[in-house]
Image (tube, grey):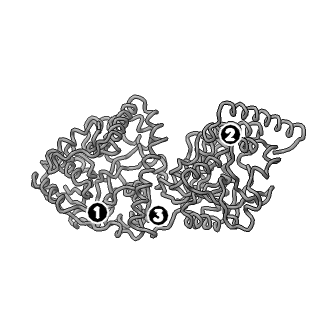
């Protein structure tokens, strides 16, 4: 049996635990040869690992991998994951020619059974065998070209037909795919394997890579999270839960962390004491870490008792938390290792609701723009069959950079755009996000100019351009953030027209300038710095529609970032075209405007009860305004 690990100094002791358990449970094997893809692995730790292997009289061979980044013909960003994880992509070229089949194991695995049946598994012509990971975020699957019904595999345990791997030039395909993704995906090696080898991976029994937190999941819940998991028979999963062969300590509940309460932690501790690292204290131990791990363990029981709650927590917080950490770490490492070598990526987010035709028209035009690295269409839970139309149109385009996301509910402008923004930043690792309404038109030149503006001005958090409306002509597209009374005046259809001069920037503010600063810009088209947007928490999802621009401008300002308008270029906005198809009744639109305004006044302007009464009285006056202008004067809005 030939087994390969990829390790550095940080994971050396965990590898020793895994390796010891492997050799302990497979003592009847005539030969076990262990290869270690060494990345920054000290001689001291190599000697300790040799000592561990010698206890079972097994051969261990270290293969220095050097600087893994130099093995790629382009700059890479592992998104916060350790670079050593990428070592497994090169097994075909670095392992000896006499290795025809190899079992790859992550360092954070623990073998608790014989692997004879796994080693002898017939791959039936597939390049490799792996275990499905049904709890992977759907956004991640889509980012590497996998459909909902297609399986996604964990790369912690891989049974590889190395002869076929070499013959089919698997390494080249992996490098090419990773390069096509811009050298950045969510889970660097794992996403690359899934994307490059779609349809070429054989599903192995979950007992050969049993994620420790799956102890608390039912089969039905996993099948609900991923329809592809139904290919795994229920009794196979239940047997794996009762008698796993390889445990995988995935997630935050790691047995080497102080305060960990995981069910399988004692198995790790038992084997640790049999290695040269016996007695090594656990990592951390602060009150914050212990409280977090206690809460994490409580969530295990929530999963067991009420799976929908766990699902809600994961979907609403898990992706953002994990990705936020990876985004920060990955960009920091990129800055340290490869300054100024990577082209900044731009993703365009388009929010659709019951208006597939307008959205498709825009997508067909901009998907050809070289300035855009991705186009992310978010369907905001449409009720008119938009999803079906969008899927057909996007598949017809045949362009992998166009991605469709489906919101689980219509949470409004902010929630829908946040889904696309966070996906762009944290899955696609876009540096900048162009937020565009479906009813806008803009040139590729404008994208380059907005991107250049952000690159040249580190203090800018968001930039836009002059706006041209087919009815109202060219507009400056920016306004100041006002206090309560100014905002009230702006919320009335008549008031905001009568007092426009007091509620907006004066004409002289824009005259003769190429770029101006503004407190807020129109949400129909703007480009944001992804990292700054994530730092601000994105749009406030408590606002369904209206006031999202002021809130975003205020949040950016509080973080010390500025909003700017490029006056030398423009975009066309067929004003409220999408909104009018959805909220044709002006009364309904004003009701939503008032709800958003009241939320804004309470949460961001912190009005007192007396001011709230005045606001409600003003809202009633606005209703009379609308009635008089619509019914008596017969004005259109």
Q: Is residue 272 visible?
A: yes
Q: Is residue 437 visible?
A: no
- Which residue is at 60% across, 62% downward? 367
Q: Cα distance, mark 1 to mark 3?
A: 22 Å
**Disc 2 or 1, which lies upstream in sequence?**
1
Residue 349 is situated, as x and y percent measured from the top left of the image, at: 59, 54
Mark 2 surroundings within 10 Å by alpha-carbon count, few (fewer than 14), some (14 through 19), many (20 or more)? many
- Which residue is at 43% across, 30% downward? 306
Look at discs 1 and 3 and give the one toward the viewer.
3
Residue 557 is situated, as x and y percent measured from the top left of the image, at: 58, 52
Residues at circles 1 and 3 in contact by the CB criterion of under 8 Å:
no
Look at discs 3 and 2 and give the one toward the viewer.
2
Q: Cα distance, mark 2 to mark 1?
A: 59 Å
User: Circle 3 sits in a helix, a strand or a loop, which is it?
Assistant: loop
Name the outermost residue toward the right: 633
Residue 442 is situated, as x and y percent measured from the top left of the image, at: 68, 62
Residue 91: mark in rendering: 1
- Which residue is at 34% across, 52% downward? 155
- Quadrant position of residue 604: top right
The residue nearer to you, when weighing 93 against 99, is: 93
Mark 1 surroundings within 10 Å by alpha-carbon count, few (fewer than 14), some (14 through 19), many (20 or more)? many
Residue 213 is situated, as x and y percent measured from the top left of the image, at: 34, 39
Indicate whether 237 appears above or below 395. above
Label 3: which residue? 182
- Quadrant where the N terminus lies? bottom left
- Quadrant where the C terminus lies? top right
Residue 597: mark in rendering: 2
User: Circle 1 sits in a helix, a strand or a loop, which is it?
Assistant: helix
Indicate whether 209 appears above or below 172. above
409 vs 196, left or right, is right
The residue nearer to you, when weighing 433 against 368, is: 433
């Amino acid at each position: 049996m030939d087994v390969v690990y990829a390790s550095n100094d940080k994971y050396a002791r965990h590898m020793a635990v895994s390796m010891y358990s492997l050799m302990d449970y497979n003592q009847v094997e005539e030969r076990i040869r262990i290869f270690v893809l060494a990345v920054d692995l000290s001689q001291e730790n190599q000697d300790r690992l040799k000592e561990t292997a010698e206890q079972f009289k097994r051969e261990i061979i270290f293969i220095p991998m050097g600087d893994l980044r130099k093995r790629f013909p382009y700059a890479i960003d592992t998104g916060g994951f350790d670079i050593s994880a990428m070592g497994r992509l090169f097994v075909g070229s670095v392992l000896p020619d006499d290795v025809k089949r190899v079992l790859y194991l992550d360092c954070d695995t623990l073998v608790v059974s014989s692997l004879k049946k796994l080693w002898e598994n017939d791959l039936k012509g597939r390049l490799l065998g792996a275990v499905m990971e049904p709890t992977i975020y759907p956004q991640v699957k889509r980012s590497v070209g996998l459909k909902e019904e297609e399986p996604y595999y964990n790369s912690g345990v891989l049974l590889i037909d190395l002869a076929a791997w070499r013959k089919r030039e698997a390494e080249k395909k992996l490098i090419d795919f990773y390069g096509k993704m811009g050298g950045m995906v969510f889970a660097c090696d794992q996403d690359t394997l899934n994307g490059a080898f779609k349809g070429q991976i054989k599903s192995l029994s979950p007992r050969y890579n049993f994620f420790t937190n799956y102890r608390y999941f039912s089969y039905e819940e996993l099948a609900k999270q991923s329809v592809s998991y139904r290919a795994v028979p229920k009794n196979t999963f239940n047997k794996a839960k009762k008698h796993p062969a390889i445990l995988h300590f995935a997630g935050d509940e790691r047995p080497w962390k102080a305060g960990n309460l995981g069910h399988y932690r004692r198995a790790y501790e038992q084997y640790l004491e049999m290695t040269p690292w016996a007695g090594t204290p656990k990592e951390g131990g602060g009150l914050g870490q212990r409280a977090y791990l206690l809460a994490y363990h409580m969530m295990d029981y929530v999963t067991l008792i009420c799976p929908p709650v766990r699902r809600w927590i994961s979907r609403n917080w898990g992706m953002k938390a994990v990705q936020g950490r990876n985004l920060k770490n990955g960009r920091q490492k990129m800055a340290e290792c490869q300054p100024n070598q990577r082209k900044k990526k731009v993703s365009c987010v388009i929010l659709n609701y019951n208006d597939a035709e307008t959205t498709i028209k825009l997508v067909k035009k901009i998907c050809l723009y070289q300035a855009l690295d991705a186009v992310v269409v978010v369907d905001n839970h449409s009720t008119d069959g938009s999803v079906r139309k969008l899927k057909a149109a996007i598949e017809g385009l045949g362009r992998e950079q166009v991605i469709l996301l489906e919101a689980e509910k219509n949470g409004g402008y902010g929630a829908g755009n946040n889904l696309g923004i966070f996906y762009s930043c944290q899955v696609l690792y876009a540096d900048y996000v162009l937020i565009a309404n479906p009813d806008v038109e803009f040139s590729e030149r404008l994208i380059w100019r907005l991107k250049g503006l952000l690159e040249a001005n580190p203090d800018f958090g968001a930039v836009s351009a002059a706006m041209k409306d087919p009815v109202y002509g060219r507009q400056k597209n920016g306004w100041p953030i006002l206090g309560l009374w100014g905002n009230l005046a702006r919320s009335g259809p008549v008031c905001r027209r009568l007092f426009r001069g007091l509620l907006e920037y004066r004409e002289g503010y824009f005259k003769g300038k190429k770029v101006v600063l503004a407190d807020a810009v129109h949400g129909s088209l703007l480009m944001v710095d992804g990292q700054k947007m994530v730092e601000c928490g994105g749009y406030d999802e408590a606002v369904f529609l209206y006031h999202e621009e002021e809130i975003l401008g205020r949040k950016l300002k509080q973080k010390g970032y500025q909003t700017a308008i490029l006056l030398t270029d423009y975009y066309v906005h067929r004003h409220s075209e999408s909104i009018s198809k959805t909220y044709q009744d002006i009364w309904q639109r004003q009701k939503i405007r008032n709800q958003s305004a009241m939320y804004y006044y309470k949460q961001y302007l912190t009005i007192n009860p007396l001011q709230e009464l005045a606001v409600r009285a003003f809202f009633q006056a606005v209703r009379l305004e609308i009635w008089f202008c619509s019914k008596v004067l017969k004005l259109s809005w």
